Amino acid sequence: MLRSTQQTTRDLRRHNRSALLSRLYLDGPGSRLELMQASGLSSATVSNVISDLISDGMVAEAGSVDSDGGRPRTLLQVRRDFGNVVGVDIGETHVQVGLFDCTLNTLDTATYPIADTKLDPEQVVQLVVQGISAVTASTDSASLLGVGVGVPGAVLSDGLVHAPTLKWSGVPLVSMLRPLVDAPLYVDNCARTLGQAEMWRGAGRDASRAVIALLGVGVGAAVATGSDSYRSATSVTAEWGHTVVQVGGAACRCGSRGCLEAYVGAEAILGRYGKDLSASDTESKMVELVGLSDPDAQRVVAQTAEYLGIGISNLVNMLNPDKVVLSGWVSAVLGPAVLAAVRDAVKRHALPYLFAQTEIELGQLGNAEVALGAATLPVLQLLATGARPA
C-alpha cells in the first residue's frame, strides 16, 4: 500500500511539473496566477512546483507586470541556458546538424552534402556523428539534453527505417547511431517533427489544425493539430507526395504514375525543364532555374505552381485545415515566386467555403527548419517528464 501511495505521489508530482513547464514553454512568460488559472492547480501546488523548477535551474523569474489594483505579478519563463539539444536532418541531398538551446534558438549548424556517400547508411551515419561532434565541440557535454534525428521515411518501433527516397529498406539506424551518440537519442519522420516545430515556433503557431507540406527532392506532409500543450499537439505524416494529380501522368519513383511528387519534387521540376544549368548540385540548380527569364523556365515554374495548388486543394477538401504551411528547401527557393499563383490554383480547385477558411503561407523557421524539427524530439521528452532526460 505504501509503495502504491509513493508511486501515485511521484506520478502526480511529475504530472504537475510537466503541466506547468509545458505551459511556460509553449505560451511564454507567465505569472503564478496565470499558471494557476490555466492548469487548474491550487496556489500552493503551483508555488511548490515552480520553486522546484527554479531550484533545478529550469525556470527563472523574468521581471514583473502590473496587476489590476494589486501588487505587480512576477513573470516566470523557461531558462534558455538550462541545456542544449541537437537536431539532425538526414535529407536526400545533405545531412544538416543544428545545435539549439532548449527553447530552440539556433546556436550553430553544420551541413554536409551526401552525394558522394551514394546514400550508404554507414557513410551517412558517419556524417551525422561528424556533424554532432562539430556543433557540440565548444559546449559542455553535460548540457546536452538529447539528439533528435529526422529521416524522410517511416521509423518503426524496432528502430528500423524505411525511407524510399534514400533507397533504405529496414535500415537499423537507431542501433547504428546509439553507440556513437553520447546523449539520449530519438529518431522520427522529418515531416512529422517539422510539423511539430511549425506548430510550436513557426507559421502554424496560431492554428488549431495545420498541414505542413515538406517540399524537397521528395514531397511529404504532416497534419498537425493543437499547440496548447505538448500532450495535445500532435503531428502525423501523410504520403501526400504519392497522391495522384494526373491520370497516366509522369512516372514516379514509387512505381506509380501521375503522383504529385513527379511534378513538384526538385528533380521532377529540373527534369521537366530539361536544359543544362551551370550549377552542379540539385539545390543550386533550383535556385538558378527560378531566377531565369527563359520562357521555358518560367513555364516550368508556372506548371509547378499549378500542380502544387491542385495538391493543396486536395488537402483542403479532405482535411479542412485552417492553415497550410509550405516548408522544406524547395519551398524556400520556389515559394516567394509562386505563392500567389499557388493560392490562385487552390482557389480554383478547392470547394469555395473550405478555401475561404484556409490560409496558405510559407514556413517561418529558416534554413535549419528540418533540423530544428528534429530537435523538438528531446524537448518533447523534457516537457513530458518535467525533468532532464536520463
Image (spheres, rainbow, N blue to C red):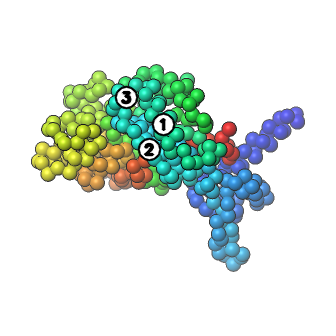
Task: For label 2, count other residues whose C-alpha is less than 10 Å away and answer few (under 14), some (14-19) or many (20+).
Answer: some
Q: Which residue is mark 2?
A: 110
Of the numbered discs 3 and 1, the one sitting upstream in the chain is 3
Q: Which residue is mark 3?
A: 117
Residue at image position (48%, 50%) is: 108
Q: For the view shown, which residue lies furthest in the front direction?
A: 138
Which of these two is toward me, 26 or 382? 382
Badge 3 element: helix
The kind of residue on which mark 2 rests is Ala
Instruction: Say if mark 2 contacts mark 1, CB within 8 Å.
Output: yes
Of the numbered discs 2 and 1, the one sitting upstream in the chain is 2
Q: For the view shown, which residue lies furthest in the bottom direction?
A: 69
Of the numbered discs 2 and 3, the one sitting upstream in the chain is 2
**Does the rendering let one see residue 348?**
no
| Quarter of the figure with the N terminus | top right
Task: For label 1, count other residues whose C-alpha is less than 10 Å away and answer few (under 14), some (14-19) or many (20+).
Answer: some
Which of these two is toward me, 63 or 316? 63
Percent of width and height locating residue 210: 43, 47
Residue at image position (52%, 40%) is: 133
Percent of width and height locating residue 100: 53, 49
Lateral position of residue 15 relative to residue 120, left or right: right
Percent of width and height locating residue 53: 71, 54
Q: Quadrant of residue 111?
A: top left
Residue at image position (34%, 30%) is: 116
Lateral position of residue 233 relative to residue 354, left or right: right
The kind of residue on which mark 3 rests is Thr
Badge 2 element: strand
Q: Which residue is mark 1?
A: 130
